[in-house]
Image: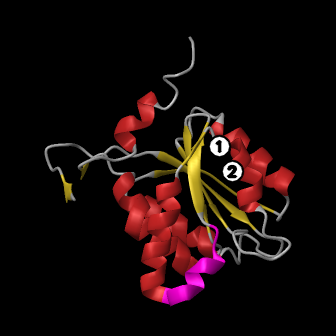
Amino acid sequence: MTIDTARSFVPVSIAVLTVSDTRTPDTDTSGDTLVARLTEAGHTLAARGIVPDDRDAIAGQVTAWSLDPGIDVVITTGGTGFTGRDVTPEALEPLFDKRMDGFSAIFHRISYEKIGTSTIQSRATGGVLNATFVFVLPGSPGACRDAWDGILSQQLDLRHRPCNFVEIMPRLDEHLKR
C-alpha cells in the first residue's frame, strides 16, 4: 500500500450525519472528529446534520444526500449498537444497492487492536446507495478516528495504491440505462 506521488490528490465531497437523541451541534464530538479529519485531509464538507434515532429520519436524510450530485460520500456516526434505539444499520442496509462487507471486517480488525472483544458491540457497515458511498460508524470519537485513519483516509485518496474508492466513483452507476 503506497501513495502514488505521480497522481494529484482529488478532494471528494463528504456529508456527515450524527444519529443521536441527545447530541446537539455543541456536543457532537464524533461529528467534530470526522469533520476535522476529512477537512485536514483536503476533502470538502458538503453537509452536516443531526437526526434522532429514528429509521425514517435516518433513511430520509441519507437518501436525500445520496441523490445530491454534490455529495460523493455520506458518513454516519451513531446508532450502531444493540440497544432498542440503535437503528442506523436497519435504516440504511435495506437501501444499499451494494453492501460493503469488507468495510465492517476491516473496521472490526482495527477496533479489536484498540478495544479488544468490545468491538462486537458495534454493527458498523458500509455500502453504495445511488452511486454514493455510505459508511455507518459507531457514535464514539475513537471509533470515528479508527475508521477514518485506518480505512477511509486511504480509500478516499485517489493516490492510494493498489486501488481506492475515488477511481471507481465515476463507474458506480454504470449499470443504469441512460
The residue wearing badge 1 is 96
Whether residue 141 is situated above or below residue 115 in the rendered picture: above
Compared across the picture, whether 86 is left or right of 45 comes to right
The residue type indicated by label 2 comes to: Glu
Please indicate, yes or no, whether residue 74 appears anywhere in the rendered image.
no
The residue type indicated by label 1 comes to: Phe
The quadrant the C terminus occupies is top right
Q: Position of residue 42 (x, y in %)?
A: 38, 55
Compared across the picture, whether 125 is left or right of 81 comes to left
* Residue stretch in magenta: 115-123
Instruction: Determine which of the numbered discs, if any, sits on residue 93 in the image.
Output: 2
The image quarter in which residue 139 lies = bottom right
For image coordinates 19% across by 58% down, the residue present is: 2
The quadrant the N terminus occupies is bottom left
Which residue appears farthest toward the left when viewing the image?
Answer: 6
Viewer-proximal residue among 99 and 171: 99
